[in-house]
Amino acid sequence: MAKILIVDDDQTIGFMLRDILEFNGHEVTVSQQPRKTRENILENDIELILLDKLISGVDGTDVCAQMKEDETVSHVPILMMSALHNVGEICKSAGAADFISKPFDMETLIEKINSILENHSANS
Amino acid sequence: MEEDLNTEELKNELKIAREYIEKLEKKNSILQSQNNKYLPGSSEDLKDSVIDNIHHPLLVLKEDLHVVFANKMYHKTFGSNEEKTKGRPVYELEEGLWDIPQLRNILETILPSKSSMSNFEISIDSKDSQVRYIILNAKEIKLFRSDEKYILLSFEDITKRKHAEAELKKNEQLYHELISSSTIAFAIFKGPDHVIEKANDSMIKLWGKGEDVFGKTILEVLPEVKDQGITELLDNVYRTGEPFYASQLPIDLVIDGKLENKFFDFTYQPQRDEKGNIVGVADIATDVTEEALLNQKIKRSEAEFRELVNFMPHKISLADAEGNAVFYNQNWLDYVGKNLEDFIAEPWTAKIHPDEREEVEKIVVGCLATGGDLDKDIRLRNKDGGYEWHICRATAIRDENNEITSWISSCTQIHKIKKEEQRKGDFLKLVSHELKTPVTSIKGYVQLLLSMLPKENSESDKKLVIKPYLNRIETQVERLIRLISEMLDLSRIEQQELQLKKENFSLNEQVENIIDDITYSNKDVQIELEHQCECNIYADKDRIGQVIINFVTNALKYSPESNKVQIKVYHEQPDNVAISVKDFGIGIAKKEQEKIFKRFYRVAGNKDDTYAGFGIGLYLSNEIIQRHHGKIFVKSDIGKGSEFTFILPLNHN
């Protein structure tokens, strides 16, 4: 089980993701403020971030890239999500571990999260 | 020559003969120029040089009509000589050539009483059995101091002149016939008052005033032309001698009592006498009323069309068979802010947006080569340098031999429509994006709830029946998601933003995965999959998957009675791969088969059957396959089912 940060400006999506992930045994923090991502990671000892690509005018890929450049938080894997289905490559090139398009199957989401966490623990 | 003939007197008499002959010669224009020699004044060689040099045959007879003397010309003309003539009676000459009643009458009856006879025309049969015409002049000569009388007989052969005259007469008659029967009207006006001297039937008919026109002035016959400037024209030609040519000149004439608007082509030509003085005017005219009216009609019609073309909000242009512009309507000229001359001088393709120019030029070259139509959305530069969208069409105009004579093209401003379309597309994108958020949320919760239910149903769970309900919600959410995606894809296609993400993948695996997904949520469908070949392709995996899903869901949707679907993966040709999806449903009528790949087209079911969807699934599929340079088609029979197939090339980049 992991500590997961959800960054999405839509509260409903945030809550839905929190409910799913908590049901699957994770500890979840929901944020609507992408600029506070670094703070949130450090504060809550986050192990994985679910980051929306477009959050209130801020490009999620920029946030992702910033996190990857910051040594204090760059170790935390990021799973990016978007309502656009063909932006996976862009997200991955910004440093995201994986990408999932909305709307998604819960099973797929859980699989992707588990896979990232497994890989991450294996690598570290 | 007689010894006692006084040469002095003879000379005198010969002078008289010469005068006669000269008089004759003057009348004969044919011979006029040839004979202007003077008789020499010497008295010695009168016979040889004077009489012999007289150009006409000449005989001098005694009173008893015996020949005293014949000149050289006589011998030459009648093939005789001195021996055969001298001392012989005139009637015996030339085997009795002159022994004709007319000459006898002259010599024996008229001459003794009148002593001279001039210009008596006779015809004789010559040796070569041709009729010859001769003019005779005879004169009695009395010598001084002598009662002896001599007769001077001169001959003038006018056969040639006669023939020429006959020819002339024949020609003249022909000419008259020609003029009077000609459809070209002809008349001659004489004098300053333009008195009608001649007018052929056509002219008389043209005037429409009856036959009684000769000797009258033009104004007497045609009083209605008085104020139409006609007499002024005639006056001018008569005065200056300069001919006047009229082309389709309108003249109002009273024809059979009714005033008619006529049009004429005519010439007024001055007529001169032999001294060159103008004596009249010749009028050659053709009634061209029909032609002129037709011309007027054509001109009016042309003016109307020109107005029409200029009035239209479209930009209309004409080009020759080679595509060189010859005309632009006012809207075109206003749009580019140039006059016709300047705009024609430059290629219109210079006005095309640089992004489209090369492509359009290529299309135009193709159209010119094949004669095919042009139909393309093009941005054209306006006079302010801005670009506006136009739908441009061109079509060839062909003559009766199917040869292209010109091109007509129209450009219609669709800038506003294009802008509206853009906004609609943007709106659709926004809508579908916004819809995705709640749908994502619903889907997530439904799946969360499903996962919360115990995996194995116990007896108590069966009473709750939550799971099937949640499954239904999930199915409908999936459907909603598909519809939203289609809407989004549609606006992407319209804005040409549908981008392909190509990758290498196994088509067989892709098909299997899709079938698994479909059968997972539709347990009762029976899908038969046949892999006739194993095939890896380089394509957009998701998009190709979308086409396969569309084919299969359509097959199920339009097969209310059957759940059987047959899918085949095979090589249609060695260098391509095909997937066909066959159902046993309601089928599609022939006339519908072409249309089903069009946007928003849905096959109307029998009776009141309706089938859900936006009608863009096949349109999208078609777009996707086209973008992969493939082919998409359907074979179908009403009531038996349909088989949809797409073919993708394997060697295409």
Image (cartoon, grey):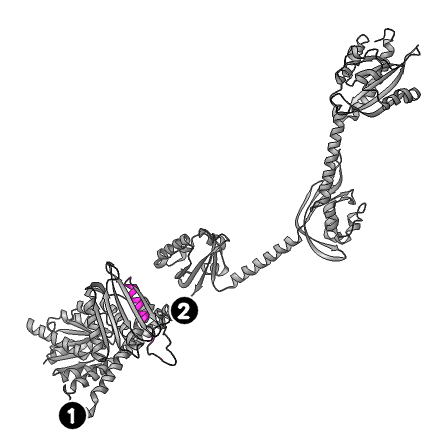
Q: Position of residue B53 (x, y in %)?
A: 77, 15
SS category of the residue bearing label 2: helix
> What is the crowding at mark 2: few (fewer than 14 residues within 10 Å), some, or many (at least 20)?
few
Image point (90%, 12%), residue name: B143
Kindly indicate the quadrant of the structure image that contains residue B279: top right
Q: Which residues are magenta?
A: B609-630
Image point (80%, 50%), residue name: B220
**Chain for numbered disc 1:** B
Residue B103 shown left or right of residue A36 in the figure: right
Residue B223 shown left or right of residue A81 in the figure: right
**Is B238 above or below relative to B393?**
above
- Tell whether position B612 is magenta: yes
Taking the image as drawn, is residue B539 in sight? Answer: yes
Q: Position of residue B128 (x, y in %)?
A: 73, 22
Q: Tag 1 or tag 2, which sits nearer the N-term?
A: 2
Quadrant housing the N terminus of chain B: top right
